[in-house]
Image (tube, rainbow, N blue to C red):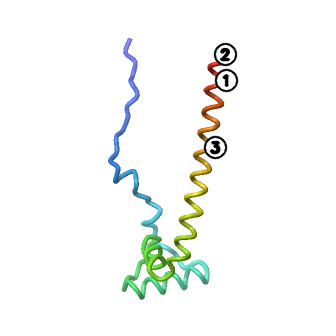
Amino acid sequence: MSEKQPTAVAITELQAHINPGLDIIVDKETELKDYLVSYTGTKLDQENVTVQMITEVLALEFPEFVYAMAEENYLLGYEQGLEDAERLYQGTAKTAEE
């Protein structure tokens, strides 16, 4: 009887830190998006503007905004990690009691 072993796919650290959402070309759906895309395209001399490009321009020209967003994201992620760890501990404690 042959059982198939689960296969694991290894990725590099660089691959783990790549966010495919940053390569999306932004459509000018709203007035704000139109402004950001036009401004970034003019600043970088590019016709197709990605989320990554807008982020880079915002980081250079409006670092207070980007810093505030990053800080909030970090704190929310940290809080989620603590909640996950607590749930894992509670689940482990219940399993040990059984």
Q: Position of residue 69 (x, y in %)?
A: 57, 68
- Give how far apart the Cα atoms at labels 2 and 3 are: 23 Å
Q: Position of residue 15 (x, y in %)?
A: 36, 52
- Residue at which label 1 appears: 94
Residue placed at 40% from the left, 82% from the top?
A: 47
- Residue at which label 2 appears: 98
Give the class, few, some or many, for how many residues have Cα within 10 Å of label 3's Cα (few <14, many ≥20). few
For residue 91, side relative to residue 47 (left or right): right
Q: Answer above or below: position of 95 versus 30.
A: above
Residue placed at 59% from the left, 77% from the top?
A: 29
- Give how far apart the Cα atoms at labels 1 and 3 are: 17 Å
Helix, strand or loop at label 1? It is helix
Numbered circle sitting on residue 83: 3
- Give how far apart the Cα atoms at labels 2 and 1 are: 7 Å
Residue placed at 44% from the left, 59% from the top?
A: 19
Residue placed at 38% from the left, 11% from the top?
A: 1
